[in-house]
Amino acid sequence: MRRLAPIALTLALAVLAGTARADTFAVLPSAPLVLPSADLPNVPGAVVVPTDLSTPPAAPEQLSYDQLLGIWQRAGAAYGVPWQVLAAINKVESNFGRNMGPSSAGAIGWMQFMPSTWLRWGFDASGDGVADPWNPEDAIYSAARYLAAAGGSADLSRAVFAYNHADWYVNEVLSLASLYGQDQGIAFSLDEMQQDLAAAEESVAAASSRLVAARARVRGEARLQHRWLVRANDASLLSDRLEYEKEAGLAEQRKAAAQVVASRAAATLAAAQGRLEQARQESAPVSFSAGASSLLGAASFDDGWAFPVGGGPALVSVAHTHHDYPAADIAAPEGSPVYAIAQGVVLRSWTQPDPKCGIGFTMQTFDGQTWTYCHLAYLEPAVLPGASLPAGASVGLVGSTGDATGPHLHLQLDPSTSYPQDEAWFQSFAGVAFRWQDAPTPEAPTQPLRFAAAVTASPAATPSAGAPVFAVVPTGSAATAPDVVPAAGVVYFNRPGS
């Protein structure tokens, strides 16, 4: 339940000749919010905080778009920080309060503060007497305070960099803020597009998983039925033959039941595919604009190449090396979109998971190189042997099928003699489409900021140098077509979790 500042009421009741006065109630305005200075952090013990900062409330508060816009604008005006920057940070950090942690690093609440940082910069903006990072007003106002302290009224890039010391993060936040500045309503229309697209991708991935399992049961019962029939044919005793034929009949019944389940799963997948395609079409007009592309998982392009996973560096990461042979494990959330890296032709594809590679395909790109994709949750129906794919074509969704420890795309050259990460096209997407896990990510060009409304600036001091203030969460019918099985020797795995 949202906390509200107390309203003082005075009640005067007078009874004269059996009648009450018309001015029985008088409402007095509450005291104005006193903003703590951005010049200095809180002194120890200056604010009252929840007993356990790291424990989210049982029913986290959710706000409407109009309520959020009001808080961003008031907090921004109070500290001389563009509200669009607060909105962008709110979106990137917690998805407007939907994913508030605690993160793996311990960041919490609407704006993902570290608990120690909250004690220094958090304050009670809602007027309930508690400085609570799980409260949207407290968290957003406190973030505005810190951005002001980091020089946000004069140098937004510097202030956002202080929020999270990564150039890709600065670029993502400011690009998104710039987009919000074009039209304040786009923050919410874009959010709705993203939620629809994510829900559709999740539905397709889940439906694909159910179909794969159902088809596996059909094949399993078919194999079992065949074994019983072979044994019945070889049996010398009539009693044995009858028993084996009985078991074969039971396997036939189970196979028929599994086929019904598989047919229903295929129909569900086809419907989910339709919803995903509709969501993609609806988001297409804005999916390639600066600031929106990462949110909507659009493909990133550079000189004829496309990065294979959408979502941007906030969600997508990769290391320079891989286990004990050259390949790239591109980490991304389950259901993230997967793209063709360049113009090319599909050589092989398989929808029944390979024990090691899972669902995947192999393609040859325009330069003659051969590439294999592994561990997909879903493969697009169009990705069939002989199909021609343009760069950036949708080919599936990130998953963890086969021998995988968590969702990621396994990408490798065939034969696997060099790392994909060493290719110039791959490296050109660092800081734009992904971040490095094991090294600093190079700075990407930032977009100029353009805001629809001016914000009055106010002087702000800079926090102590070298003191990290914030930590951030690193944090798509052909469905019934026969499976295509990969040729032997296509994928080169040497150890689990590749």
Image: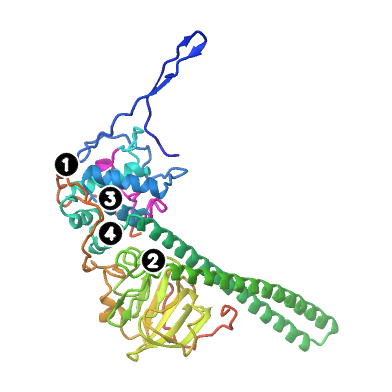
Identify whether 257 is placed above or below 454: below
Looking at the image, tell me whether mark 4 or mark 3 is earlier in sequence order: 3
What secondary structure characterizes most of the magenta part? loop
Residue that numbered label 2 is attached to: 296
Q: Position of residue 222 (x, y in %)?
A: 68, 80
Residue type at mark 1 is Asp
Please name the colour scheme applied to the rendered image: rainbow
Cα–Cα gap, marks 4 and 3: 12 Å
Residue type at mark 3 is Trp
Q: Using residue 361 as the reference point, say whether residue 256 is left or right of it.
A: right
Identify whether 368 is placed above or below 244: below
Looking at the image, tell me whether mark 2 or mark 4 is earlier in sequence order: 4
* Label 2: which secondary element: loop
Residue placed at 83% from the left, 85% from the top? 237
Q: Nearer the viewer, residue 464 or 90?
A: 90
Residue that numbered label 4 is attached to: 173
Residue type at mark 2 is Leu
- The numbered dot on residue 83 is 3
Whether residues under marks 4 and 3 lie with C-beta atoms below 8 angstroms apart, the answer is no
Q: Position of residue 51 (x, y in %)?
A: 37, 37
Q: Tell me the magenta residue range.
A: 95-123
Q: Residues within 10 Å of mark 2 (few under 14, many from 20)?
A: many
Cα–Cα gap, marks 4 and 1: 24 Å
Q: Position of residue 307 (x, y in %)?
A: 34, 76
